[in-house]
Image (cartoon, grey):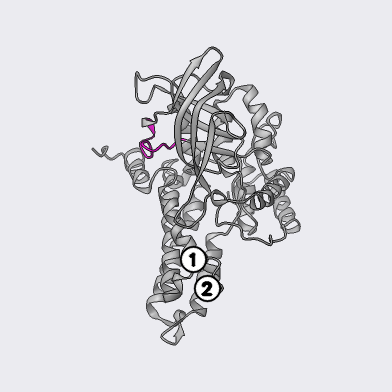
Amino acid sequence: MSERTLSPEQVEFREHCRRWLAANRPEPPSFRLPLTPIEVMTEEQMRYLRAWQKRCYEAGLIGCDYPREYGGGGHSGFQQIASQEIGRASVPYMVNVIGLSMAAPTILNHGTEEQKRSFLGPLFAADEIWCQGFSEPNAGSDLASVQASAVRDGDNWIMNGHKVWTSLAHFASWMITLCRTSNEHKHLGLTYFIVPVAHTKGVTVRPLIKMTGETGFNEVLLEDVVVPDTMRVDEVGKGWTVAMTTLLYERGAAEGAGSAGGVSLDERMQSLIALARRMKRGGKPAWEGPLIRDRLMQLAIRIEGMRHMFRLTRVEALTEHPLRIPLQAKVAVSELMQDMAAVALEIEGPHAGLYVGDTHAPDDGQWPLAFLNSYGFTIAAGSNEIQRNILGERVLGLAKSK
């Protein structure tokens, strides 16, 4: 959002965000925080991050554009400003990322009045953590193939099924999920629900250990779970339509209720350059090697290109298709982060085999951890291969692949 296009109120709000973030930066924790919120494992990490998100919400930096009656700020065009400033401030990330970026906009667009009033305020404040129950063992990128069932029983639904790769389910109060309510049609037989997770009879959450050793995501088993019809989002059989709203926000093609913070691409780049200056290759700093310098320069060029790409999204006249830049950003950013980590391992050489917790590991083993985690980001929200198909078919107008 360009300063030229901001209203006086928005300019004042940007200054408020900057001043508040500068004055209220939290003290670094005595324990390690994971790279992103979807790897949060311990109660200690969660308490710290929930407290930070709540402070941001109380300062007016979360849910800015949502109506006041639903716990929001009641503004328009403020959330993008707040998210930008949180991202620039090098502060911790918002832990309730699934709630903010997926559940909140879906409920606002498709939920009942009661759902909006009940769920959005606690979601913004991180009083209640949310997770997403879309993927199943046999339904990943082919989301319409989900088989978890919901059978009507009076004013309730009885759910059975198996959800997988469910980030933050071990802390979640609620799960947005798709269930099959009819076998008449692959897409039309789906309905969207809000399912209580914590302390709910029939809901079992089992951690999945990634190759990083982290357990940020899980599998969720539903066994005769009773869910009131009041937890249904939109009409029966409209689940696919509602899910497309969720995925639109998950893939970054629309602004949610706010989700930012953590280490920026610029900060990662500076850390990578510092690593190259520090690590020795052939008795000299890796920085002095022409191949390494070239690899670093190529990464810096891509980061600068992305900076200008994101600027285009703020000028409507320069965006020939509203989905092109936001959708391609998911592909570009996830692959850039993967390539940055790969270059770091090349710089570290034999030291790249030292992992988190090893006293001899450069940067506490964060680069090997980042490289292993990077594959999850190229798969999440629809694999990058799927994302390229969407860009080709819906943006470029190419024929559907067979």
Is label 1 in contact with label 2 (beta carbons under 8 Å)? Answer: yes
Residue 11 in the image: state x and y as whole percent. Answer: 68, 49
> Which stretch is magenta?
134-144
Q: Which residue is mark 1?
A: 367
Label 2 CA crowd tier, 10 Å (few <14, some 14–19, many 20+) = some
Question: Is residue 64 visible to the viewer in this orientation of the structure?
Answer: no
Could you tell me which residue is drawn at 57 percent across and 42 percent down? 170
Could you tell me which residue is drawn at 41 percent across and 68 percent down? 298
As drawn, 130 above or below 240: below
Q: Which mark is residue 357?
A: none
Q: Which mark is residue 362?
A: 2
Could you tell me which residue is drawn at 37 percent across and 40 percent down? 141
Mark 1 or 2 closer to N-term?
A: 2
User: Is 140 a magenta residue?
Assistant: yes
Q: Nearer the viewer, residue 230 or 401?
A: 230
Dot 2 falls on a residue whose secondary structure is helix
Q: Which of the 4 image quadrants contains residue 109?
A: top right
Tell me which amino acid carries mark 1. Trp
